[in-house]
Amino acid sequence: MKAVLQRVQRADVTVEGAVIGAIDRGLLVFLGVCALDDEACADYLVKKIRGLRIFPDENGKSNLSIADIGGEILIISQFTLYADTKKGNRPSFIEAAPPEQANSLYEYFIAQCRGEFSKVACGAFGASMKISLINDGPYTIILETP
């Protein structure tokens, strides 16, 4: 699995003109799933995200985790994180998991996050989504499972 985390002041996701998920201070997580991923990969990412100390403390140092600040999470499925652009000009997505597997792990990841964080919002798997955010930093982290 790959996850791109962006620290945000707020973020929302819109499908067909309607906001389906929104958060205030926290993390916008773009999640990609490959064919080799399983629930253990999702568990690893949730634990890693929970413990990352990327929010400022009272001295402005990145010493606080999302759990420490009671931050919120918006999770967006994004198979394009597995784009292979080594050959030609059209990306290949053969490393991305098939939709059924990817959706199952995406839903599992959301469920695990709901057990860990104060508020979890999400996009719609496979939908054309519009994402709005106010980036805080900017501060962007890329995580991959081992």
Image (cartoon, rainbow, N blue to C red):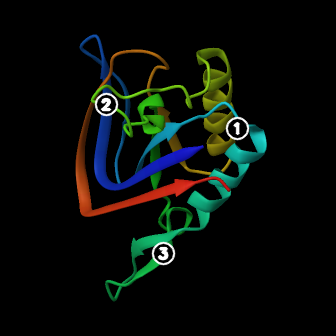
Residue 41 visible: yes
Q: Which residue is mark 2?
A: 88
Dots 1, 2 in contact, CB < 8 A: no
Q: Nearer the viewer, mark 3 or mark 1?
A: 1
Question: Where residue 89 sits in the image (x, y, percent)?
Answer: 27, 29
Q: Which residue is mark 3?
A: 64
The amino acid beneath tag 1 is Asp
The amino acid beneath tag 3 is Leu
Q: Residue at x 67, y 58 (%)?
A: 47
Image quarter hosting the C terminus? bottom right
Q: Nearer the viewer, residue 126 or 65?
A: 126
| Helix, strand or loop for disc 3 | strand
Residue 136 sits above or below residue 4 on the image: below
| Helix, strand or loop for disc 1 | loop
Relative to 119, 4 lies left or right = left
The amino acid beneath tag 2 is Gly
Residue 112 sits above or below residue 14 on the image: below
Question: Where residue 46 sits in the image (x, y, percent)?
Answer: 64, 52
Dots 3, 1 in contact, CB < 8 A: no
What is the quadrant of residue 83 in the picture?
Answer: top left
Q: Earlier in the sequence, mark 1 or mark 2?
A: 1
Q: Which mark is residue 37?
A: 1
What is the quadrant of residue 114 in the picture?
Answer: top right
Q: CA distance from mark 1 to mark 2?
A: 27 Å
- Crowd class of label 2 (few under 14; some 14 to 19; many from 20; radius 10 Å): few
Image quarter hosting the N terminus? top right
Q: Residue at x 64, y 38 (%)?
A: 109
Q: Nearer the viewer, residue 76 or 59?
A: 76
Q: Nearer the viewer, mark 2 or mark 3?
A: 2
Q: Nearer the viewer, mark 1 or mark 2?
A: 2
Q: CA distance from mark 3 to mark 1?
A: 29 Å
- Crowd class of label 3 (few under 14; some 14 to 19; many from 20; radius 10 Å): some
